[in-house]
Amino acid sequence: MRPVSEGGIKESSSEGFVGVFARAGGAAERVVRRFMPDPFVLVLLLTLVALGLGLLTMPAVAGDAGDTMLGKGSALVKAWTDGFGNPEILKFGLQIILIVVTGEAIAASPPARRLLARLTSMPKTATQALLLVTVFALVTGWLHWGFGLVSSALLAREVGRSLEKRGIAIHYALLGTGAYTSMLLWHAGLTASAPLLMNTEKNFVSEVLGLKGAKVPLSETIFAPYNLVACAALLVIVPPLVVAMHPKKGVVPPDLATIPAPPDDAEETPPQTPAEWLDKTRVLSFVTGAIGLTFLVRYFREHGFDLNHNVVNCSFLMLGMVLHRSPVAYARAIAASVRGVSGIVLQFPFYGGILEVMKLTGLSSSIAHVFVEASSPRTLPFFTFLASILTKSFVPSGAGEWAVEGPVMLQAAKALGVPYGKITMAVAYGNMLGNMYQPFWSLPLLGLMGLRARDIMGFCLILFVVCLPVLGVALLL
């Protein structure tokens, strides 16, 4: 079986501008691979930068040596280590972890697999396959980014396998790019980290702003008209763009038989003991999940569609229990997805430390002042959007980026009288668009599909260039 060519792009003069962007993407990926360290290393570097700048800018502290560098350093280190135990940051991190693992567990459930199996037989041409995978990725990513990322990768892989069996040529890496667009709308959707946090009372960002108990409703973020229009515009633009990037001569998919399918959670043997019966019965998990879903029905009846992290996580946790065949099967699915969130577990305590340093030293206020001086109320969201794209290079996690950048930009918004919801979405837009050049969240997809970052990076850069003005204009409206 003839594999995808080096870099995921088949060299051909007929590819025109697509080939130019693909080669540029390959060069960018080589630079990133050579110079960008592991995300945890970036967190450590960001920590040292925050400590260094804080030491230079913080005022004198009380105490015998309060006006000396040693006294400032001691106070700075204390604030940094205190931030590791910040309960709001740790709670936020756990909420993000639950969003990932519950979404992935639903994608691995038997009903979800059967749905994906039905979808794989639908496309009859490469164009139909690319449209199916891309639209599916954009919609499911907007609904739940953890579910969307994994289910889109599984769908794309099985569509590629189906097309291979039927002798239909397709560029497999471009199919993977279509699946990765699930991360292009996620921070404007129902599981968006920043908007859901801001819709939660007594969140740590509101505390920084001195707005205790205040929250930003979803009508000003996810369900704001400009956001819905921007999402609809990308849903219309992106799928045809992915189709247009397909090389005219096509590329046969690689040998997918070498890529293992997800494990089946069917039980191999019937239960032999009461303990095994409890482990393998569907009754216990189904009844518990059904009770939880009943509670959610009552919640939505009383509060309307007022989402926050707790509501979203409860919904998908209960739904996952209902869809899986037994408590043990669901636990195995969760255990399999937990391996992919190690970066969040390791990085979030450091984000808490950085936040405490910025609060103690006034560093966040100083940075916010720079944006206030350089912006007007109309342009601040756009400049925040650009800053968020840059920050994405150093903080791949959307939740982590909001923990570091959110308080800074919201202070600038407070000074200029800009709606907090608009600034929240500006940071969210920069973060989700940054996924098209920062391949951190593509790793689960690449592993499932047997691809490399270089295979999709050229196509992703084209998406980045096209989608940037769409999101920028939405923020300027």
Image (tube, rainbow, N blue to C red):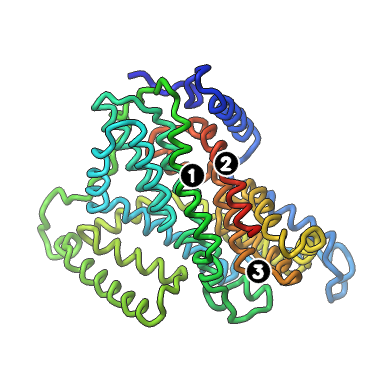
Residue shown at 68%/67% (left/top)? 410
Residue shown at 74%/53% (left/top)? 49
Q: Which residue is mark 1?
A: 237
Residue 355 in which image quadrant: bottom right
Residue 208 in which image quadrant: bottom right
Q: Are marks 2 and 3 in contact (CB under 8 Å)?
A: no
- Counting other residues with Cα less than 10 Å from the Cα at mark 3, is it few (<14), some (14-19), or many (20 or more)? some
Q: Earlier in the sequence, mark 2 or mark 3?
A: 3
- Furthest toward the right, the residue is 67
Q: Is residue 475 visible?
A: yes
Relative to 255, say whether 53 is above or below. below
Q: Earlier in the sequence, mark 1 or mark 2?
A: 1
Q: Element at badge 3?
A: helix
Residue shown at 12%/50% (left/top)? 269
Distance Cα–Cα, label 1 vs label 2: 9 Å
Relative to 246, say whether 96 is above or below. below
Q: Is residue 385 left or right of residue 172?
A: right
Residue 334 drawn at (x, y percent) = 34, 56
Residue 372 drawn at (x, y percent) = 78, 63
Q: Amino acid at mark 1?
A: Ile
Total marks drawn? 3
Q: Nearer the viewer, residue 35 or 243?
A: 243
Q: Quarter of the image containing the C terminus?
A: bottom right
Q: Which residue is mark 3?
A: 82
Q: Which mark is residue 81?
A: none
Q: Is residue 109 left or right of residue 224?
A: left
Q: Which residue is mark 2?
A: 466
